[in-house]
Amino acid sequence: MVHGIGLELYKLRSRKDVRLILLVISVFYLVMVGVTAIKPAYFGTKFMVENSFSTLQFIPLIVMVFAADLMSSEFQQGTIKNLIIAAKSRLQIIASKAVALIIVIGLMYLGIFFLDTIVSGALFHEAFQSIIMKDTFLWILGSAFETLLLGSFVFFLSVISKTPAIPVAIGVLVYLMVGLIDGANFSLIAKLSLLKWNIVNMLNFKAQLISHSLQTQTGLSITNFVVGIVVYVALFLVASYLVFKNKSV
């Protein structure tokens, strides 16, 4: 399995589109750092530091593309049969790809926090305070959990569809729905408490890490969020295996 994980990470690292995406997001990060340093009044230094210079919002989109392509590329390129023959079991294929996805998510968010710490300490001394860096860490931590949820969801959809377009489109729709239907979501939760466990509500995790008062609307504690997200991720990965196990290739 270790070999399988390494192979999946190598595939991602070797792809030109992956390198291009990472280059674009890196350039965007540097541009936003420059704008904040030159014109801090435009966005507010504290806000930009806490939000990783507006980069965090793009990482879930990038991860969803990666997650959808992990399986769909094997089907589209016709390599899935060779992969099944080479692997000891289909479970090993799903597990290797899932672990590789988790590693990628972890590395991306650790990298962002590392950069934020260095840049803030070097350029934005007024924002390099314990309370601000704590909020930055919590925002990144919450984003990582939410991205893991979205990534596992899209990964499951890609096993079903064999193509990346539909899973990414559905994943992006769910991601964008948080801001669009939160009002309706909170109203429904107030009427039926069980609805607090819906997947859209889980994407309020990072916001509640910063603002604990949001619990009155989400109906979930921080512990509830963590448990809910972990359970969703586990269900999506188990479902991915069950679908792939019985899928004709």
Image (spheres, rainbow, N blue to C red):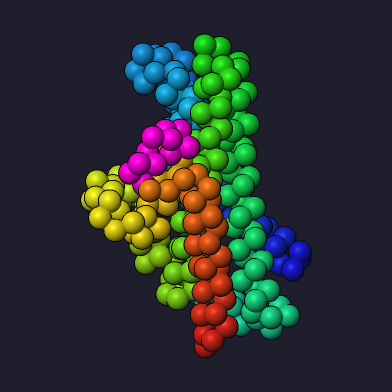
- Magenta residue check for 215: yes
On screen, residue 11 versus residue 6, left or right, reads left
**Residue drawn 45% across the image and 20% down it:** 46
Residue 220 visible within the image:
yes
**Residue drawn 33% across the image and 56% down it:** 193
**Residue drawn 50% across the image and 44% down it:** 222
Most extreme residue toward the right is 2
- Residue 69 image point, x, y percent: 51, 64
- Residue 140 image point, x, y percent: 53, 38
187 and 137: which one is in front?
Answer: 187
**Residue drawn 45% across the image and 33% down it:** 210
Prevalent SS, magenta region:
helix
200 and 123: which one is in front?
Answer: 200
Tell me if residue 23 comes above or below residue 52 in the rendering: below
How many marks overall? 0
- Residue 194 image point, x, y percent: 36, 60
Most extreme residue toward the top is 126
243 and 68: which one is in front?
Answer: 243
On screen, residue 75 versus residue 40, left or right, reads right
- Magenta residue check for 217: yes
Q: What are the residue bounds of the magenta stretch? A: 208-218
Tell me if residue 201 comes above or below residue 70 in the rendering: above
Residue 169 visible within the image:
no
